[in-house]
Amino acid sequence: MCTVCGCGDTVQFDGKRQTELLPYGHVLAQAPAKHTHGHHHGLGPAGLSAPDLSQARLIAVETSILAKNDGYALSNRAALSELGVLALNLVSSPGSGKTTLLCKTIEMLGDAPLAVIEGDQQTSLDADRIRATGAGAVQVNTGKGCHLDAQMVGRAMDALKLPRGAFLFIENVGNLVCPAAFDLGEDAKVVILSVTEGEDKPLKYHDMFTAASLAILNKVDLAPYCDADLDAYEANLRRVHPTIEILRVSARTGEGMQAWVDWLRGRLAAKG
Amino acid sequence: MHELSLCEGIRSIIAEQARVHGFTCVTVLRVEIGRFAGVEKAALAFAFDEAMRGSEAEGARLEVIDLPGHALCYGCDRLVDIEERFSVCPLCGSAKLMPQGGDEMRIKDMEVI
């Protein structure tokens, strides 16, 4: 797989290879033909030499290495704006409870239009769980890829046919490192940190916590059983990101869920 | 963090530049990497050599220009240079800093023939 644009047969959308879904001229990334120097006229760096003539040229590029991803992100953002859709990129380590949180959130949002993009290396287990709630979901399998990129999300958005004014939840691949750098066109990154993971995680993986607007401290019902110091979690979150919003939540018991749903409704209304 | 992905990005930018400027060989590539970009330089250099094989930049020298990390200190309201994203303010000792830049990852220029 091309890990930049996501091309390649290991990336699957709802179990289908993307090449099957995208017959209209998308070219898979492949190595260009090996270039060779066809001329040998001298001893200079170009295999050529002439007195007082430098063969090297300096080309100013000044281009972001992630420019391609950022271009796709820009068009996703424009499409989302056009529809008044609020898109949230949910990021966390594996096992923080993202999918359980989403299922409960969907239940609480009731009739509000929404859709889900599920990113995982393998299986459609998460999309199956989301669909069981009645919500529309597309599973993106990244194969060996460690993050979703903006092009994958754009294709998934096309497949979802988003209703106007909807919530779009993008559940990223469970990984506290790489997804921080890839803009998907979302309105905000929401990082989910469960209290079983350790208070030091915001310090150890600070890129993700700096990139997120909201941190959900999940599984707070377990805090007494694993000696979790919730204030220490919050202090470390604010140390790497002074203005981050924090919500203490237990998706299992429902504690704090209303505040999260209110946050979502507020953000959607503000976008409206 | 995902240095091979970054090198694939570099490769496609080089291919585009080669089409525009009509060169066949890159000898030196200069990239600017911010202190907080999360890029491991040794891993980038390793991935670069591998990812450029068969491209215009095969065998090119990669030069990494480090860009400093700045932060706005909420304690003393000044812009300061910091080593780590969560360093304390070197001027007033406050731990409340908001990084400003330092997450750059871009190709600055290249020498081509």
Image: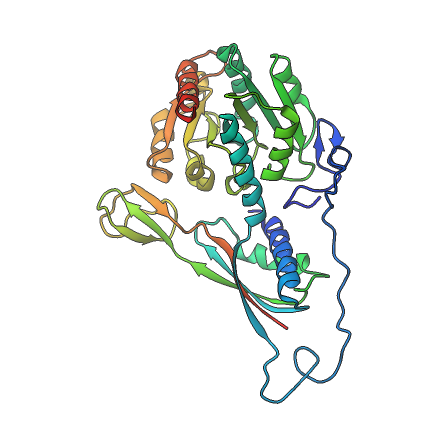
Image position of A247 with respect to A76: above or below: above
**Left or right side of B109 for B74:** left
User: In the figure, residue A240 lies in which quadrant?
Assistant: top left
Q: From the top left corner, tell me how far across and down residue A155 is, in percent.
A: 65, 33
Q: From the top left corner, tell me how far across and down residue A59 is, in percent.
A: 55, 67
Location of the N terminus of chain A by quadrant is top right
Q: Residue at x 58, y 55 (%)?
A: B43
Q: How many marks?
A: 0
Location of the C terminus of chain A by quadrant is top left
- Is residue B68 visible in the rendered image? The answer is yes
Instruction: Give the camera-side residue of A229 and B21.
Output: B21
Instruction: Give the camera-side residue of A9 and A218.
Output: A9
Image position of A112 with respect to A188: above or below: above
**Left or right side of A13 for A171:** left
Q: Residue at x 38, y 34 (%)?
A: A237
Tell me the colour scheme of the image.
Answer: rainbow
Q: From the top left corner, tell me how far across and down residue A92 is, in percent.
A: 52, 31
Instruction: Give the camera-side residue of A27 and A235.
Output: A27
Q: From the top left corner, tell me how far across and down residue A90 is, in percent.
A: 51, 29
Instruction: Give the camera-side residue of A14 and A238.
Output: A14
Residue at the far bottom in the pictured view: A51
Q: Residue at x 33, y 32 (%)?
A: A235
